[in-house]
Structure formats: C-alpha cells, structure tokens
Amino acid sequence: MDVRAQWQIRLLLGDQDLILKPGEAAEFDTAIPYWFGTVGKRAVELLTMFSSQGERLHLRTSLGNSRSSWGRR
C-alpha cells in the first residue's frame, strides 16, 4: 500500500465511496447514511462540525480556495 494512503479517510456516503486526502473537506446532508474510516493502518484525525439549524458550512483549504470533495473518488 502507498504510504501516502495511510493519512486518507474513506467516506461512504449513500451510494458514493469517497477518499479524502489531508486538507480536503466534505459537506453533506447527515440524513444520508454515512460512515468514516481510515484507508491505511495509521490513525487519522477528523474534525466534524454539525449545525442544529442545518446551515451550510463554507470550508476552505489552507491555500484559501473553496474545496469540496463531494463526488470525488
């Protein structure tokens, strides 16, 4: 396995299977069934934010670009 894959998170979101790399973000409706897990054997850190009002979060990478992993694999 590629060493870089050890810091990736797998997101199963409904019918989608997504791989999130360090610094990437995913924004989705939590009413859709989802699951998070690591790609490699190392532990990873995951920051989650939930809003009781259902307001959309606007996430940015350290480069300042809008970033969403929705639909990426």
Image (cartoon, rainbow, N blue to C red):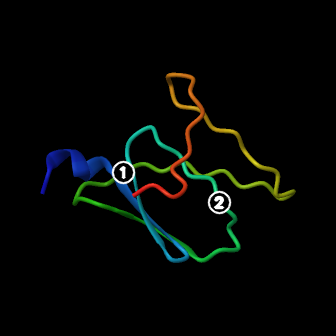
The spot of residue 5 in percent (x, y) is: 24, 51
Mark 1 or mark 2: which comes first in sequence?
Answer: 2
Q: What residue is at 52 percent from the left and 31 percent from the top?
A: 61
Please name which of the two marks, 1 or 2, marks the residue nearer to the observer. 2
The spot of residue 18 in percent (x, y) is: 43, 61
Which one is nearer the viewer's eye here, 61 or 38? Answer: 61
Task: Give the crowd class for mark 1: few <14, some 14-19, many >=20 residues within 10 Å.
Answer: some
Look at the image and tell me in which quarter the N terminus lies: bottom left
53, above or below 47, in the image: below
Secondary structure under the numbered disc 1 in the rendered image = loop
**Residue occupied by mark 2:** 28
Q: Which amino acid does label 2 sit on?
A: Phe
Q: Which residue lies furthest to the right in this view?
A: 53
Q: What residue is at 70 percent from the left and 39 percent from the top?
A: 58
The spot of residue 24 in percent (x, y) is: 47, 42
**Residue occupied by mark 1:** 44
